[in-house]
Image (cartoon, rainbow, N blue to C red):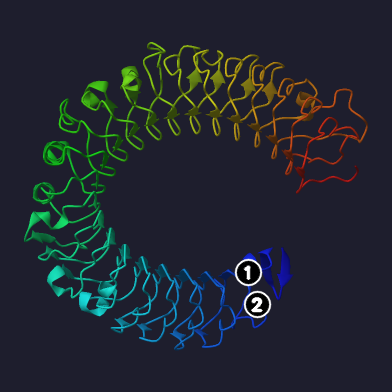
Amino acid sequence: CFSLQGCQVQGVWGKDMKVLCYLVGLSRVPWSLPVMVVNLDLSQNRFSDLQANDFHNLSQLQVLNVSQNKISTIDSHTFSNQDRLELLNLTKNRLTDLSSSMFTGLSSLTTLLLSHNSITNIEPHAFSSMKNLRMIDLASNKLQTLDSMHAVFMLRTLERLQIGDNGLHNFLTKDLRGTLMNLTKLDISRNPLSEIDMASNVFQNLHSLDTSYVGEGHSITWFFKDPCFLNALKNLMLSGVNMKPAELSGLIRGLSCSSLENIQLNYLNLTDSDNLVEHICSFQPNLTFLQLRGNNFTGLKEDVFKNCTSLTHLDLSMNNFQEVSKLTFKHLHFLQVLSLAYNKLFIVSDDIVQMPSLQMLDLSYNNIEDIFMNQSASASKLTHLSLVGNQLIKLFSSSQFQALSRLVELQIGKNLLLEISAPFSPSLVMLKSLELRKNKLTAIKKYTFVNLSALQTLNLVANQIESIEAGAFDGLSNLETLLIASNNIGSPLLEKGIFNGLTSLKELQMFSNYISYASTEKLKRPPFLQLKSLQIFTLNSQAHTGLLHLPANFFEGLISVKRIHAGNLAITTL
């Protein structure tokens, strides 16, 4: 790439050329832009308008980003020579009116982004030249009636429409003059709606409807002249709507012709006694995704999911659960992803990992003090487990994760771990990523990771590690990334051969430790002699007196290194 009047030009001349002029203080479009530019980014500047000749010579343009400026006017025919433009981003400007000639010439445009302006008026033929427009985002404007969006609903090619946060008080399909035959996704969220009326069959192919946070403090009424008007609907977002459980139940029951697969019911103050979950699943037996985040559940009945046998993803995070059992989920034979994050769990039944299809379990940010998953190693299909942000103090047994023979990622960061007193289980033969950051570990013992032969990433950042025994990293011949920054590691520790055996290591982060030397004199045992594959080494910001001197052979052995980050040091001699 090379520079052009404060802009960056990337790509081959005449082929996929990209010009980046964002955040450079421009108030006018540069006149000397390469005529073969395909992708032009003029965002985060100071444009107040776009003039007719600004892009006249840029006939090859396919992507234009002028978001986050102060554009209030766009001259007629500004884009008359942009018949190849496919994406136009005008997000976060000051537009108030869209005229009939503003977008003339954009015959190939497929995506138009106009959110976060102050648009109150769209002239009837504003989009008439856009014969291929598939997606338009008008969210966060001031289009308070459907009549003000008449031009939008005449776009027969439109597939995705976002008109959330506009101040709409009613959504009545009888007010629509067009029929969006191809529309598959509609977002009307965050409008102060009091009524949603599906009195006409204008959304025959709608797959996704987002009505999250509509109502703004008052109740909302739905009306269906015919429940089959939304027979193609698969995804329904109802998070934060002002509707009672009985009303929600009635709504979902009313969609009897739809075969819903994804329902979001987050932040609705739902409780155990509402019985909403049982009703939803009986009305929509093909449901695969169910979100119940941010409600007031404290416990769930044993058969609450009896009718939810098709569920593959279940989000119960941010509730008030204190304990859960496998029995709660006994009917969910196909459940693959379960989130119980941000609850008040202090204990988790070890049989929960034996759910027949469960692959991802999120138990982060609870009050769990102990975890013991030592059932039959063949029983669990779990591949990802998060225990971040709990109260674990000690990993005391090699059998604690014995049941998790298929585990690929284990996260135990932000706990209170003081010690890992036994090697990790030999069952963890498939583990590739282990996170132990932000605990209170002071030492890593020999053979701690010896059984983790497949491990590729080990994160020990922000502990209090000051001791690492020789052999602590034995068995990690496939480790590629080791993160031990922000600990208490000093220079003497490096000379004990602690990195021996890490033959595949490509990245080592050691910033913010306590490495320092009295002189540039050669070391008897260069610390990184075995790291022949290391490519990225981060050493900056050493504490205490800082790294004043660098031994002459400090980097010896790093024959593959490409980048060394050594900023914010106090080096006086090399």
Q: Which mark is residue 33?
A: 2
Q: Residue at x 44, y 83 (%)?
A: 72
Q: Position of residue 512 (x, y in %)?
A: 69, 40
Q: Quadrant of the C terminus?
A: top right
User: How many numbered discs sit on the rendered protein?
Assistant: 2
Q: Position of residue 356 (x, y in %)?
A: 31, 21
- Residue 182 drawn above or below residue 149: above
Between 517 and 474, the one lying in front of the other is: 474
Relative to 249, 534 lies left or right: right
Q: Which mark is residue 19?
A: 1
Which amino acid type is marked by label 1? Val
Relative to 286, 431 lies left or right: right
Residue 380 seen by the camera = yes
SS for callout 1: strand
Which amino acid type is marked by label 2? Leu
For the residue carrying disc 1, how many other residues have a C-alpha within 10 Å: few (<14), some (14-19), or many (20+)?
many
Marks 1,2: beta carbons within 8 A: yes
SS for callout 2: loop
- Quadrant for residue 273, please give it: top left
Q: CA distance from mark 1 to mark 2?
A: 8 Å
